[in-house]
Structures are given as structure tokens and as C-alpha cells.
């Protein structure tokens, strides 16, 4: 992607813009873009411009500052600025000005947001898989214990009225009991989801 380049006065008026910046911001001509006031028309948040100006004042340059601008049609655009304060030689009639390179990073930011959203969804999926595995493991353990207990206490189970309590005959229907909603509800009360 082509970089926009501009020069502006310290007060926020463009003095020069390149065609790439004109295209990036959706203006019809250089003259139309040069006529705008940066602080009120270009920056979505005037504080961001003050922050960039403060960085220029402290360091004489800005490197990698990301700010939100507006295109001519009002749509937001995220740009990265890299520039310097140009101080004319003594005796020159020209005032100090900013010379800045502008990179449109809107699409990159969108992709980063999508990447992080995908990472979050993947983490949630892994957590859900672990919970499902925990549930399956609990079912297997309970099935094994039930089978062991039934083998040891076959006569005691036969005399109990399990069918009245659970709706299942524990001697014949223990597999169906484990697969049933009765089992699931009891298990889910034990495992915090």
C-alpha cells in the first residue's frame, strides 16, 4: 500500500499532501484536502491530535503513533504516523512544519481483532472439550463402580425396589440408568459447569 505524505503547519493546516493521502482519505483533489482543518475535520478525537503534537514537542518526531481519522465521507480510518518537526535554517522565511508519513492500518487492525476473537473462541472450545471429557470420565468411573457394586451386592440390589426409586431395574437396566437424564442431572449437580 502506498504511504500518504503530508506537511502541515504547527497549527494544523496542510501545506502539502501527496496523491496517496488524497486517495486514502477519499478526497477529490489535493486542494480539497489542503483546505480542511486537521483538528476538527480529520481527527475523530481532538485529544489524539494533541497527544501527537505533544510527542512532536517532546521528541521532535513521532514514530508509530496510531490514531483514528475520518475519511471525507465520515467513515473511520486507523492510521499510523511517522514524522518529524522540520526546523528551517536561520534566515529562511519558512516556519517550522511537520513532515509526516501516513500508513492506513485499518485492515490490519480488523484482522488482528478477528484473530484474537478466533483465539478466544478456540479457548472456549478447548474448555468445553475438557468439560465434556470430564463428564465422560465421570460416567465411565460411575459405570465401573456400579458394575463392581452390583457384582458384590447382587442379592441386596435384587431386594431393593430400585425401579420405584429411579424407574430402572438396577440388575438389568444399569447401562440405561447411566445414560438417562436421572444420571445426567445428578452428575451435573456434582460437576460445576
Image (cartoon, rainbow, N blue to C red):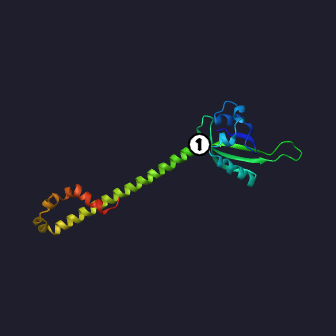
Taking the image as shown, residue 45 lies to the left or right of residue 31, namely left
Q: Residue furthest front?
A: 40
Can residue 148 be seen from the camera position used here? yes
Neighbor class of circle 1 (other Cα within 10 Å; few <14, some 14-19, many 20+) is some
| Percent x, y of residue 182 | 22, 57
Q: Mark 1: which secondary structure?
A: helix
Residue 159 in percent (x, y) is at 10, 66
Looking at this view, name the residue that lies furthest to the top.
28
Name which residue lies at 17% across and 66% down.
150
Q: Which residue is mark 1?
A: 106
Q: Position of residue 9 (x, y in %)?
A: 76, 43
Q: Residue 4 appears in which quarter of the rendering?
A: top right
Placement of the N terminus among the 4 image quadrants: top right
Placement of the C terminus among the 4 image quadrants: bottom left
Identity of the residue furthest to the right in this view: 91
Residue at x 75%, y 41% (from the top left corner): 7
Residue 143 drawn at (x, y percent): 24, 61
Asked if one can make out residue 171 in the rendered structure from this viewpoint, the answer is: no
Using the image as rendered, state which of residue 165 and residue 128 is in the foreground.
165
Up the image or down, 73 lies above or below 103; here it is above
What residue lies at 82% left-to-right and 44% top-to-bottom?
A: 95
Q: Nearer the viewer, residue 176 or 67?
A: 67
**Image: 35 above or below 114:** above
Image height check: is 30 above or below 180?
above
Depicted 66 relative to depicted 25: above or below? below
Amino acid at each position: 500500500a502506498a504511504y500518504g505524505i503530508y506537511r502541515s503547519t504547527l497549527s494544523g493546516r496542510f501545506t502539502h499532501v501527496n496523491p496517496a493521502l488524497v486517495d486514502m482519505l477519499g478526497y477529490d483533489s489535493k486542494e480539497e484536502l489542503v483546505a480542511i482543518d486537521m483538528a476538527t475535520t480529520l481527527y475523530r478525537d481532538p485529544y489524539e491530535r494533541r497527544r501527537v503534537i505533544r510527542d512532536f514537542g517532546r521528541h521532535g518526531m513521532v514514530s508509530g503513533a496510531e490514531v483514528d481519522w475520518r475519511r471525507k465521507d465520515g467513515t473511520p480510518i486507523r492510521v499510523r504516523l511517522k514524522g518529524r518537526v522540520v526546523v528551517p535554517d536561520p534566515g529562511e522565511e519558512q516556519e517550522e512544519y511537520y513532515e509526516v508519513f501516513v500508513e492506513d492500518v485499518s485492515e490490519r487492525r480488523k484482522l488482528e481483532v478477528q484473530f484474537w476473537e478466533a483465539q478466544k473462541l478456540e479457548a472456549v472450545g478447548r474448555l468445553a472439550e475438557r468439560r465434556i471429557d470430564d463428564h465422560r470420565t465421570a460416567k465411565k468411573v460411575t459405570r465401573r463402580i456400579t458394575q463392581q457394586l452390583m457384582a458384590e451386592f447382587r442379592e441386596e440390589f435384587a431386594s431393593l425396589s430400585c425401579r420405584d426409586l429411579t424407574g430402572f431395574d438396577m440388575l438389568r437396566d444399569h447401562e440405561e440408568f447411566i445414560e438417562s437424564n436421572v444420571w445426567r442431572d445428578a452428575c451435573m449437580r456434582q460437576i460445576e459447569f
